[in-house]
Image (cartoon, grey):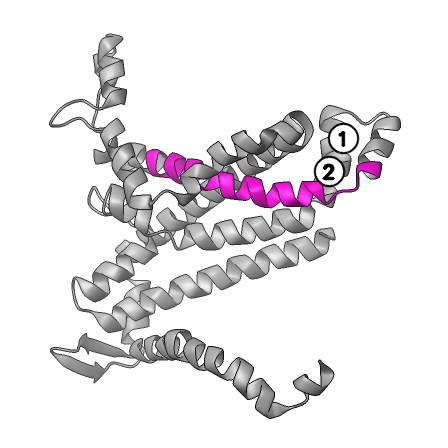
Amino acid sequence: MNRVLSDWRAILVFVGPALLLYTGIVLIPILWSLGLTTYEGSPITGFHRVGAANFVRLLHDATFFKALWFGTRYAVFVSAGQVIFGLLLALMYAFYLKKTSALVRTLVFLPVVLPTVAVAQMVSKLFAIVPQYGLVNSALHALHLDSLVQAWLGQGGTAFWIIAAMDIWKAMGFYAILLYTGLVDIPEETIEAARLDGAQGWSLARFVVLPLLAPITVASLIFSLNGTLKVFDSIMALTGGGPGNATTPLTLLFYKTSFTYSEYGYGSTLALTLAVQCLIVTLLIFWRARRSGA
């Protein structure tokens, strides 16, 4: 192995194609997008250099700050939900269901492999109000709670919670499996020794299981936050960012700015802020995890 790794021609043969592909698909578009932040225009009208004008515009753009706040709020709430519910499910698999958990794990994991558009369509039908009531409004009507019948997806406040609940439900199975793999790696002797010392239930989870599970919990949190900060497909399929801009995160805002309004320079600037936000969040989690010894 060492002889192979010391041969630059072998390295070139094995790593070169993948490196070229990565450069062409990832690195060049990133550098291209960075360059576009100092330009304005489109391929049709042509590009002209504007210097830092896009960044100045960003600081005065109320829509940007609204999208940033929505995306941050969404990421914090949904990531917490995905990891907490995933952890509870993993604990249930490991300590209550044990070997009989295979069927439950399969059922819980099923939403992860479903297409997001299909899930969004199902949810939109559940909360529909026109042309006929969906399941939720029909149930409220049947219970004579007509004052609660409303356009759930037509209001920013209720639409936020529906999108969040849908994405938590869809992804918590993935985090449950991820955390379960960490749980099964905890030596059985450690659990038994803690039980002999009197640790049961919550005290066993709080002082033994959760500390040993901290590294994979941190990794799950980073995965989840980076995924939820970049949420696009579920919101696009469910509300399209509406009503108005009430459910528009940064991803949808720079998509519309670039490809609907053909402002590629400003769209690239918005994309850069999202990349910086993801980087800051990841570094903060690593910093906090290292300080706590996870």
In magenta segment, residue 187: yes
- Left or right of residue 137: residue 168: right
In magenta segment, residue 141: no
Q: Amino acid at mark 2?
A: Val
Vertical comparison of 223 with 128: above or below: below
The residue most toward the top is 144
Of residue 107 and residue 145, the one placed in the foreground of this image is 107
Residues in magenta, as a range: 162-189
Seen at 14% across and 23% down, the residue is: 132
Q: Amino acid at mark 1?
A: Leu
The numbered disc on residue 222 is none
In the rendered image, residue 127, in percent from the top left (x then y), is placed at 25, 28
Question: Would you identify the image quadrant in which residue 102 lies?
Answer: top right
**Tag 1 residue:** 204
Seen at 29% across and 81% down, the residue is: 51
Question: Would you identify the image quadrant in which residue 266 lies?
Answer: bottom left
Tell me, yes or no, whether the two marked residues, 2 and 1, touch with CB atoms within 8 Å.
yes
**Tag 2 residue:** 209
- Left or right of residue 105: residue 269: left
Seen at 31% across and 65% down, the residue is: 58
Question: Label 1 crowding class (10 Å Cα cut-off): few <14, some 14-19, many 20+?
Answer: some
Q: What secondary structure is marked by label 2?
A: helix
Question: Would you identify the image quadrant in which residue 140 lies?
Answer: top left
